[in-house]
Image (cartoon, rainbow, N blue to C red):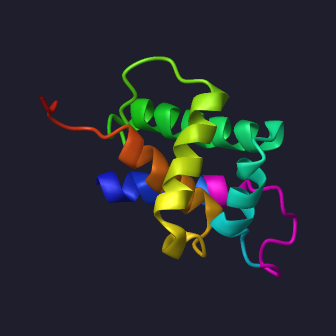
Amino acid sequence: MKSLLIAGILSAVLLGAGRPTLGANPPPAANELSIECADETDSCAAYLLGVFDGLVVGGRITKENPICPKGGVNGRQLLLIFNKWARENPEKLSIVRGVAVTAAFMDAFPCGPATP
């Protein structure tokens, strides 16, 4: 069920990527986003906040949380999280940006039993 939720959220993120001709053009890859986010632009922070909010709200609606943040998070923190993930996973930067951002956030905000 959790994978269904994640697939649904990712579909919503990808379909709302702002490209009216999505069928004619491939969705933007994470590599493009990593270049923009390396410059810490406001548009990158806004995109990351949008994905973050979508994951949190979707998780609350369905009760199947793909991410479990422990407190408030701002755009600057999300930039740092994604940039770290991109540096540590260069082989994954060819995947769709929404999938990459979700993976970065799932790594940073895991759900499940607390670790000591």
Q: Quadrant of the C terminus?
A: top left
Residue 74: x, y in percent? Answer: 61, 24
Magenta stretch, main secondary structure class: loop
Give the magenta range: 13-25
16 within the magenta span? yes
Front residue (pair 114, 1): 114
Total marks placed: 0
Residue 5: x and y in percent read 40, 51
Q: Is residue 29 visible?
A: yes
Q: Residue furthest bottom?
A: 24
Residue 30 image-quadrant placement: bottom right
User: Which sits in the foreground, 25 or 84?
Assistant: 84
Horizontal and vertical percent position of residue 54: 57, 39
State whether residue 9 appears in this view: no
- Where residue 41 appears, as percent x and y from the top left, is 81, 41
Residue at (50%, 40%) from the top-left corner?
Answer: 55
- Does residue 33 appear left or right of residue 116 in this picture? right
